[in-house]
Image (cartoon, grey):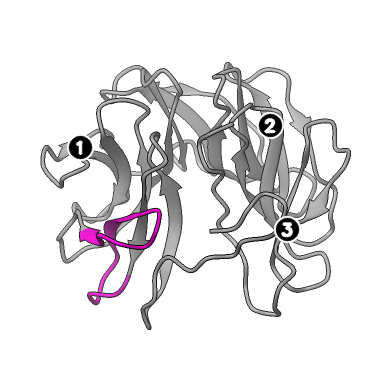
Amino acid sequence: SIHRDGGELRRLTDHTSNDNNPTWAPDGIRLAFESFRDGNWEIYTVFADGSNLRRLTDHPDGDTHPAWAPFGGRLAFVSNRNNNADIFSINGDGSGLTQLTDNPAADTDPVWSPDGSKIAFRSWRNGNADIFVMDANGGTVTQLTTSLADEGVPVWSPDGSKIAFRSEHDGDWEIYFMNADGSGLTQLTTNSNYDGDPTWSGNSLHLAYQSDPDGNPEIYAGNLDGSQFYLLSDSNPAFDGFPIWWPIP
């Protein structure tokens, strides 16, 4: 973890395998993440100080992309356990597994709305990767983006009004955001290299994201009008990515 001003870098996991896609629990006490430490991708949780590591899923096919519900302690995640990428949900103690999508196309990148009633996700069900939203129980699926470009990694603003995501709409990966109903599409970044993995500040006024304008992936943050972007993670030449803002404004 790292402070929003770029200081106080702290290591939470220490394993020879990869630990990816961290996501804060709504109370800020623990995180969920995906790890390959047991020979396949599974979902784990860990406290914010790096203690109390716990494995939530246990299946020979991959379980990835965890996302906490705002209430009730459930997580959505992606699993290939039915030989296709679908979205499931599970309790924070590993119980109560429920399948939410069942489509021949891949469904990935789930994220809950702040009121817990909806889940936005990425799907290839209409031929290319677009952003969709469904009821939290898997019902009433609505397509939000219709670009011929690929879109992914949606993330809901804490006030529920907007969804940020990455898109190849202008020929390379950039950060965009839109209103939660799919209207008001706005491009935030214009970097010729990769910009992706956006995350909202708790007050819904800022976005942090991964970018590599100089060829080295780092974490940046800035305002929604594209002003005052600043580098957070310029501490070493290693990869810095998958930011997730602590859920306290």
Q: Is residue 42 magenta?
A: yes
Residue found at x 26% / y 71%: 40
Q: Secondary structure at mark 2?
A: strand
Q: Is residue 174 left or right of residue 119?
A: right
Q: CA distance from mark 2 to mark 1?
A: 28 Å
| Number of other residues with Cα within 10 Å of mark 3, as a class: few under 14, some 14 to 19, many 20 or more | some
- Main SS, magenta region, reads loop
Residue found at x 31% / y 25%: 71
Q: Identity of the amino acid at label 1?
A: Gln
Query: Disc 3 or disc 1, which is closer to the eye?
Result: 3
Whichever of labels 2 and 1 marks the residue nearer the N terminus, that label is 1
Mark 2 — residue? 177
Mark number displayed over residue 232: 3
Q: Identity of the amino acid at label 3?
A: Leu
Above/below status of 112 relative to 116: below
Q: Position of residue 76 (x, y in %)?
A: 31, 39
Whichever of labels 3 and 2 marks the residue nearer the N terminus, that label is 2
The answer to whether the residue labelled 2 contacts the one labelled 1, judged by CB atoms less than 8 Å apart, is: no
Residue found at x 87% / y 42%: 228
Q: Secondary structure at mark 3?
A: loop
Above/below status of 245 relative to 161: below
Whichever of labels 3 and 1 marks the residue nearer the N terminus, that label is 1
| Number of other residues with Cα within 10 Å of mark 1, as a class: few under 14, some 14 to 19, many 20 or more | some
Mark 1 — residue? 99
Q: Which residues are magenta?
A: 36-54
